[in-house]
Structures are given as structure tokens and as C-alpha cells.
Image: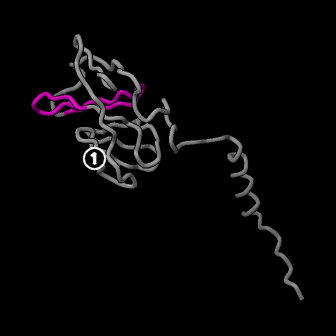
């Protein structure tokens, strides 16, 4: 004699109802192109701000351009794309000199681009950076 299917519990029905509306929203918190600007790094030089915005030993996050700029103790500037190398999310948080990805919690050193905490395994992409007329410029041909 075949087994009779058991009726769905109230919990199963409610859980399914809660998840179903989200399926059609097209939410893409992660993946290549996700995030604020959607580009992994600038494709042209971008002006970021005044040179004075980045203190020695510190870093400044430019969310609207997906770039972080740091300054070594000797005054040298470095710039990195802030698109997470794990799943392509735009990193939107800088705590001291640590970048924290909102999607899965990967952490990166804003001074070196190196991974500090998984799930990311690849460092951030370094960008050319210079100062022109007192302004920080990062990206290709910067």
C-alpha cells in the first residue's frame, strides 16, 4: 500500500509564503557588477578629493567611485578598487584602515589591499594614483 503524503504544516506554508515574494524582486546583493557603481574599477581617471583628505597612516573611502586611498607614513599614496574580490559587492565600510564587505564579511587592509578575513581569497585590485593640482586622481592613466 503506498504511503499517504502528509499535509503541510502551518509552519511550512508560512515559511514558503514569506520567501515567495522575494523570488521575483531580482535582488542581486552579490555577483559581478553588484553594488553601487557596478564596475570593478574605474575605466578612466577619476578625481576623488583633496590630497589633504588622506592622513599619513590612514585611508579614505570614496564610495561613489568604489575606490579607497591610503597614505603610508612616508606620504606615499596607494589606491585600490573597493569591489570585493569574493562576489563583486561594493565595499561600503571603512573602520580605521580595514575595509569590510557588507555581503559576506570579507575584510581587506586598505593600505595593502590584502585579505584580512575570508571568504575573499584574492587581494583588492590596485589602481594608479597621483595628485594633480592638489586633488587625488585614481584610475587608468592617473
Q: Which residues are magenta?
A: 58-78
Secondary structure beneath label 1: loop
Judge left or right: residue 5 versus residue 102: right
Q: Which residue is mark 1?
A: 114
The structure residue drawn at horizontal position 24% and vertical position 21%, both measured from the top left corner, is 53
Where does the image place residue 138, in percent across and percent down from the top left? 31, 24
The structure residue drawn at horizontal position 52% and vertical position 44%, both measured from the top left corner, is 31
Decide: is 105 above or below 67: below
Q: Quadrant of the C terminus?
A: top left
Query: Any magenta on residue 26?
Result: no
Where does the image place residue 24, in percent across and percent down from the top left? 71, 43
Residue 46: which quarter of the image? top left
Extreme residue toward the top, this view: 133
Judge left or right: residue 128 versus residue 90: left
Decide: is 59 above or below 26: above
Query: Any magenta on residue 77?
Result: yes
Between residues 5 and 13, which one lies in front from this camera angle? 5
Between residues 70 and 121, which one lies in front from this camera angle? 121
Number of residues whose C-alpha sits closer than 10 Å to that of mark 1, classed few (under 14), some (14–19) or many (20 or more): some
Between residues 52 and 10, which one lies in front from this camera angle? 52
Q: Quadrant of the N terminus?
A: bottom right
Judge left or right: residue 133 versus residue 19: left
Extreme residue toward the bottom, this view: 1
Where does the image place residue 4, in percent across and percent down from the top left? 86, 80
The structure residue drawn at horizontal position 27% and vertical position 46%, both measured from the top left corner, is 114
The structure residue drawn at horizontal position 61% and vertical position 41%, both measured from the top left corner, is 27
Where does the image place residue 7, in percent across and percent down from the top left? 83, 71
Amino acid at each position: 500500500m503506498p504511503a499517504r503524503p502528509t499535509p503541510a504544516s502551518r509552519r511550512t506554508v508560512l515559511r514558503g509564503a514569506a520567501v515567495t515574494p522575494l523570488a521575483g524582486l531580482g535582488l542581486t546583493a552579490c555577483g559581478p557588477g553588484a553594488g553601487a557603481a557596478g564596475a570593478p574599477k574605474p575605466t578612466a581617471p577619476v578625481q576623488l578629493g583633496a590630497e589633504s583628505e588622506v592622513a599619513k597612516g590612514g585611508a579614505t573611502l570614496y564610495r561613489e567611485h568604489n575606490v579607497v586611498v591610503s597614505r603610508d607614513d612616508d606620504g606615499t599614496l596607494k589606491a585600490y578598487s573597493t569591489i570585493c574580490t569574493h562576489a563583486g559587492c561594493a565595499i561600503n565600510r571603512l573602520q580605521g584602515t580595514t575595509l569590510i564587505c557588507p555581503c559576506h564579511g570579507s575584510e581587506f587592509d586598505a593600505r595593502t589591499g590584502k585579505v584580512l578575513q575570508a571568504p575573499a581569497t584574492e587581494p583588492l585590485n590596485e589602481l594608479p594614483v597621483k595628485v594633480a593640482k592638489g586633488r587625488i586622481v585614481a584610475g587608468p592613466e592617473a
